[in-house]
Image (cartoon, grey):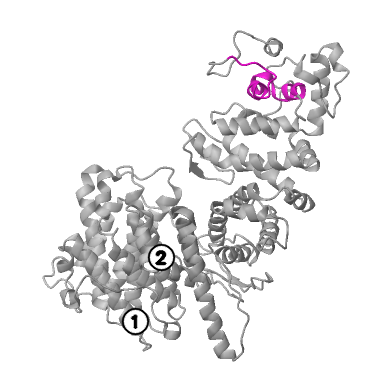
Amino acid sequence: VSSKKRSINKETARKKTTTTTTRKFNMSSSTFSPTTTTTTTTANIPSSSDQITELQCCLQSFHNPNNDNDYDDDTITIQKQIEFIQSLSKWNEELESQFTTSSSSSSLDEKNEEQIKQIGIELYSTFLWLLQSSSHDNLFSGRRNEQTSIVTFTSLPVEKNKYGDVSSYQEIVTQRKEDMEQLAMYLASILSQSSSSSSSPKEVEETTTMQLISELLRTMTNFIRWIMSSKSNSAASKSLTAFLTKGTICLSLTLLELSASSAETELNQQVARNASVLLFRTTHSKPNPLLQYFWITKNGYKLIAKLLLLSDISTPLLFSVVRHVHHVVASFPKRVGLDLLNDGLRDQQLLLQREEEEKSHEQQQQVVADATTVLIATLAWCIKSSPAFPGKDRINDRRSDIALEILRILFALGGDNASSANNNNRTNNPHFDLMTQMGILLADILHLPNANVATYEVKVASVSLLMDTPINYGYYLLANDCIRTILDVLELQVSSVVLERDVSGTKSSSFGGYSKVSGSKDDAAALTPILIVLIKYGTANPEILRQMKERIFPKEECDELYQKAIDDLPLSSSSSVSSSSIQRGGGGGAKNMSPIDNPSKRTLRYKVIKLMTWSESNIKRLSAELMWILCNSDPTEFILRTGFGNAVHMLGMRGFVNIPEGNSSGGVGVATTAEEMLQQ
């Protein structure tokens, strides 16, 4: 791919302001030339109204049950569709606010299970009716180059005439689940065939229909997410049986391809994004075989490859596309899903190169980028484009979410990338330049300011990738002052875990707001990567170790510790103690059960020491290992700085303390002082 751009466009059904960014970059040279226009947005306050009743009222109002004629061209006026769009948009905004701000999953009353199931059927039937009534309209005019559809519709198990005359909403809503699935597949086929015309659509009527399609897609997505995140989803999930079908996959794929491939408009981008998110929710939920149907049977990998290479898709749509890649990488064994994506990217790039050759009448050198190359190039754009990362509007400017998702994908692929990264021979390593570019990019990410939670999350994800970098990369980190920034991240993470959790199990963010904390597993996931990285580079590089020690053991603390160590240790031992290095072979003489200088709770050392007795075994071991290397692997200094009660587990692992077998508490029998324990 020689160049491409991304546009951050607004979602008009949700906000009235937008942030717009255009990017152009060359994958081989990483040259960026962004242009930007920005305005601000305001957040909506979530409502406490009952979502079930409100959605039911929206649907009933649109259905107009008192009208015997039900749906026809006379009863469903444009004004009525606009009112329906507004009602759905309000419901979606309230539910999305709940997703964002709630610290726990929403609970659904079991008494409402049948009502929820019926609402799901009515919602899906309304969507099918709308597509059925407009399937022959030219909603997706101006498709790019009139390309042949990627989505396949061979061997449809329905006859056209069977559903060709279904025009009533009531006819659809009363059908069996199997019939609704077949109707959805049929409509996908009809839409794909009828939308290739290039005639102009009716300005008002069909624009309103597209807006309604977009809002219904958004509503179905939120409905699925809401039910699946509910605590009582055992029976309530039955209401999703109408959605979790192959028919929904076909319709979502078709709408995604048609809207993303049409002439660029904000409305088309909205439809494409909402169709993509519905596709993600459908394949991400159970039953999982739907993912294989989407990715392989229906050529989903080809469509995702095409969208990754498109030059003018909005960042909300791009974020959804990248999420599909992450889901596939995590779900398919042995890189099957990723290999298919690479095949799709190769075919699409060769097609684009042939088209370019036909236009220029010049043969071009074939340069094909694989999925990793495309993702790293997109990550580079996210970080380096304007406005300054991460932007002020996270609703419409999704660069931070895209960057976070790409970093997680690269981490999931870490085993393969690590083997390439550790091969420092440019001749034998075909990915050397790519890994070099990624190394530079990681340093850029680490220097982003900790101004908000979006940037902080990206920095934490980048630290995880450092676990797979070669040891020599430590010199680059040193040269670019990255050790300091990594230690900044460590302090924020440790503070969040140790100091900012209240008794209810809720953790307050360092940037404001609250997030759900499930316990020690979340702590381990957050802290394990950065502890491993610091131990790895601190052990291998003396200069990195020195910088770490200066940060965790500041000079003023060392001076105080030196004086107290002289007073506390036996006279024969104190002569070997210095303010810069408190050393005493074997640990004898140090008998303090807690840190000898009682560090303040505000210090980083205090917080790391707290982790040494954490309930999660990995956190306890890694934090003790970090303190051990900072103490030059000397047991006396280790005890003085951390206290014997905190140090005993690591001392036992290192063979300085005999811990009796079968003592599950980690104690050491009847000994009551550090000196007695060491004598054991």
Q: Amino acid at mark 1?
A: Ser
Magenta stretch encompasses residue 602: no
Tell me if I can see residue 167 in this picture: no
The x, y position of residue 482, in whole percent, is: 73, 50
The quarter of the picture where the C terminus appears is top right
Left or right of residue 667: residue 196? left
User: Could you say whether the residue bearing mark 1 is in a helix, strand or loop?
Assistant: loop
Pick whichever of labels 2 and 1 is earlier in the sequence. Answer: 1
> What span is colored magenta in the figure?
635-660
The x, y position of residue 139, in whole percent, is: 34, 80
Identify residue for label 2: 276
User: Could you say whether the residue bearing mark 2 is in a helix, strand or loop?
Assistant: helix
The quarter of the picture where the N terminus appears is bottom right
| Residue at the image point whose x is 63% and y is 52% from the top | 418
Q: Is residue 267 above or below residue 90?
A: below
Tell me if I can see residue 471 in this picture: yes
Q: Amino acid at mark 2?
A: Ser
The image quarter in which residue 189 lies: bottom left
| Residue at the image point whose x is 45% and y is 65% from the top | 15
Identify residue for label 1: 195
| Residue at the image point whose x is 37% and y is 59% from the top | 291
